[in-house]
Each structure stands twice: as C-alpha cells, then as structure tokens.
Image (cartoon, helix red, strand yellow):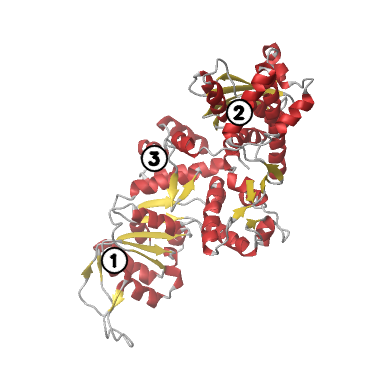
Amino acid sequence: MKAANLSISELIQFSPGFVGLQGRRLLIHDLSSLGQFRKDLIETIGEDMARRILTRKGLFWGQADCAGMQRLFTWDSKEELIKAVAELIKIIGFGYAEIIEISLEESSNALTMQLRCADSAEVEQHRNEFGKALAPICWVIVGYLSGYVSYCLGKNVYFSETKCQGAEASNCIFIGKDIDTWGNEFDTQLPFFLAADIQKRVQRLSMRIREQQRALNVHRKQLQASQVPALLSGVETKSKAFMNVLALSDRVASFDTTILITGETGTGKELLARHIHGISARKHHPFLAVNCSALPESLLENELFGHKAGSFTGAHSSEIGLFEAAEKGTIFLDEIGDISLSTQAKLLRVLQSKEIRPVGQMKPQHIDVRVISATNRDLDKLVSEGLFREDLLYRLRVLNIVVPPLRERTEDILPLARFFVSKLAKKYAILNLRLDPQTVDVLTRYFWPGNVRQLENALEHAAVLCNDGVLTPETLPAAINGADGTPINAVKVIPLEEIETQHIRSILKLTGGNRAETAKVLGISESTLYRRLRISK
C-alpha cells in the first residue's frame, strides 16, 4: 500500500446512528462548537494548560490512527506508512497537508520531517473566537503528528509548529524529529506532551470531542488546480509509464498517419485508439473497429471492402465495407497479426493507393480513412517466420505506441478499480458499493496477467457476490484472492530498469533515432538520455 492510495470512501462507514473508521466509532463535530470548547478551555484553565490538553488529545488520536493503518494495510515501506499521516490529515478534515521533506534512517529510526498544512481547522476555530494569534496554535495537529509517527517508529517523535496561518503566515509549517535528533532543543516544548495532575479531567473533556471531521472540497480543489491529472475515459492516470503513453498519443493524434498499438491482451489498446481518434481532426466522423481474428478470411475481406450485388452466390444486394463506411474517420484493425497473407496483400494495396475495390467492382474507389491497428503479437517475429509481410508492417508502423501491462503501472490499479466499482454500482443498482481495505491490498499485490480487462471482470464477479455493498477479498475470483492455493504475487516482475530501457528504445525508434527529440518526448535532458542508454548496453 502507498500513502497516496488512501481513500475516504473506503475508510469511513456511514449508517444510521453510527459513523466508523473500520470498526472504531467516530463522532462528527461542528467546527463552531469545537471553537467554543477551545475558548472555554483557555478561559477556564489558561492557555498553557489548554494547549497541553489539546496536544495530548491529538497525541492519543494519532497513535490510534497509526495502529489502525498498520492493522488494515500491508505497506510498501515504513516511510510510506509515515507519509500516510498527511493523507489522514486531509481525510479527517484537519487541513490540506503535504510533506515537504522526509529523511528516515531505518536502522536507528532517526527521523527529520517537514510538513506543510493549508486551511487548518484549528486556525479557523481560534480566529472565530480570538482573532489573530500571536504564536502557532495548531496544538491538536502537533499532537496528532507526534502520536502517529511515534507509534509507527516505536520511539518518541515530536513535532513543532514553526509557522502558523493563525499568526498571519501563508501556511502552517510543522517540523518533526525523533527525541534523540531534537536533543535539548525541544526541552521547552516537551511538557505540553506530558500528563498533568488533571489527567482525569482531560479525559472527560476529551471525550466530548473524541473525533472531528470537516470536508474541505473548495480549498483542496484550489490547491490541486495546478496538478491536472492525465485522464483516459475519465480514469485518472498516476503511473509515469502510462502517462508517457497518453502524452505520446496526444502528440501523434494530430498527425494523420497510420499507428500501430502493441501490448498484451486486455491492456486497453482499443480504448487508446478511440482516445486518439477523439482528439484528432477526424473526431466528428466515424470510428469503426473490427477484430481481425474473429472472422474467417472471406468474411473479413467482405467486412473490410464490401461487395456489389451479384458478385457471388447469395449477394442479392450491394454492401459497403468498413473502409467505405469510415470515410473521413478512423478504422481500427484489432489483432492485425492474425490476418492471412492474401488479406495482407489487399490491405497493403489500400494503404499505398488510398483506394479500395469491393468484390465484384472493377473500378477502384478512393477513400479518406485513417488506419490504426493493434496486436498482442510480435510482428517482427512473424515477419522472420514468413507469416507477415514486412512491407505491410512498415506501412502500419509509421508510429508505434507500446501500451504497458497493468503489472508495470501498479499506481493505476486503484484508480481503475474505483472507476469500475462506480460503473458497477450504477449497472447493478447497488448503493454505496465500495472496496474493503483488505481488497485494496489484494488488488494492488496481484500480478494481473489479463490486465485491465481481467481487473474489470474480477470486480464484476465481486459485485455480484458481495453483501451490503462491500467488495471483500472473498468475493473476488479464487485465482486472485489466493483461495485456489496460487500465491497472488507468484509471477516474476520485470525489473524497473528493464522496463525503462524498453520504453526509451521504443521512443527512440519512433523518432527515427533522433536523440534530441527522444529526450524531449521523455521529458529528460539529452545527457540523461545518453547516460541511461550507455548503462543499458
């Protein structure tokens, strides 16, 4: 599990009379009542004691949430578990938090961490009651950060707020270090984290504000506006590998030439072809797709080129083919590697002359169609075996886009899964259909040999079998949840360096060996490109 993959819809459960965080009961509090409570606390027992109470409230809260995160998920690393504290601060409603810096020495658990928070709920509480503050006042957040990270590392870690929006700073800034790294520098703040004589009273007061949440949609959208996500059919793309594919697709869409899309079965090659058509100059004209492997040779040729009435027995009327029907649009030839040599020759003639000849018609007919083809087969190997024409391959592969398998873009698994869950909720009219946290773990660890198509089918299987709208691991197919005895991550994963090298060489091939252009497409400097190519030799 990665910190960025946490989702409020999968963590928080709502039902009449109960709001929970995976078994722990929560209370939703109004911010104005919490502000009034803070005011009463300060005026009753003084600011120092109030700060101590609220800091320790946050301390216990953070410890409980960290324990929950360790129980619910298998984390990629200890650092990812620590980073999750920023996501929880956003989910809880404390504010919009992001980690500026983190340095963790895992052997000693020595930590230095810096975190920025905008639109702090505590700042709003304090300003509503007291106006501008003279010093940092996000005491609960300080305690929460300290409790969470301390529980994670198994040693005392303390945070200090160095800048605060309540005191007119642009953001709240928190610095955290383990107690050994702080040394004597933290002595003046340490008492605020320690129990006082009024511990019982603190516990009674804290019960009134056990949990608090506040949705911050407007400010979050403003802060994230500069980070426009890459989208394909409404699904956010997070993996660099697939973002590069989309960037390349967007770039070549405006060039009216043939494109070959390659990749494993189920990676979404047709979806990508539709995306390219949809942003091209041909978008207002037809997009027609045909699966070349699904039809025998005679039917495929008729499907592509059409026929005239009387051209063969049973041809009582003329029928136009897909090339003619797709005029000014795009034709998508899926599984192009499965067509016969005879059909290959006819397709080559179409690409060369921009003309078709329906069966039974003597005069050729001009067409204006863009051709995008796709295959999961190695066409170069088929050429060497004499099963595919080399001249046709050159015509089809003017531009080549390689779609990576899902196992090489694991960051996209959860966005895709959530998109499919949303579709299935509408399809089967299941209210509040959602993923169980343990299911999230299973999905992100599985190898997905069937790629995106397998993921969608697995979730539909789970939706049909689930109870109360919760997709648990048990509702997934046995091969995915390990119920058939197959380890869910048993298949060997391709090393990242090899994936990177393959992608660089595919872009280099696309640009005709132009290294300056390749570096520009990849978003790296030419010197970096030279270095990576040299390392990969």
Kindly state the secondary structure of the residue where label 3 is placed.
helix
Q: Residue at x 51, y 58 (%)?
A: 423
Q: Residue at x 34, y 55 (%)?
A: 278
Q: Residue at x 52, y 35 (%)?
A: 535
Q: Residues within 10 Å of mark 1 (few under 14, many from 20)?
A: some
Residue 206, placed above or below residue 246: above
Amino acid type at circle 2 is Gln
Precedes in sequence: disc 3 or disc 1: 1
Q: Residues within 10 Å of mark 3 (few under 14, many from 20)?
A: some
Kindly state the secondary structure of the residue where label 1 is placed.
helix
Left or right, 500 with reference to 202: left
Q: Position of residue 2 (x, y in %)?
A: 61, 40
Residue 389, placed above or below residue 152: below
In this orientation, does residue 177 appear?
no
Which residue carries the number 3 mark?
Answer: 521
Which residue carries the number 1 mark?
Answer: 349
Which residue carries the number 2 mark?
Answer: 36
Task: Identify which residue, 504 or 226, lies in the foreground.
Answer: 226
Q: Residues within 10 Å of mark 2 (few under 14, many from 20)?
A: some
Q: Residue at x 70, y 54 (%)?
A: 487
Q: Quadrant of residue 284?
A: bottom left
In this orientation, does residue 516 appear?
yes
Q: Position of residue 347 (x, y in %)?
A: 33, 66
The reply to whether callout 3 and callout 1 are in contact (CB within 8 Å) is no
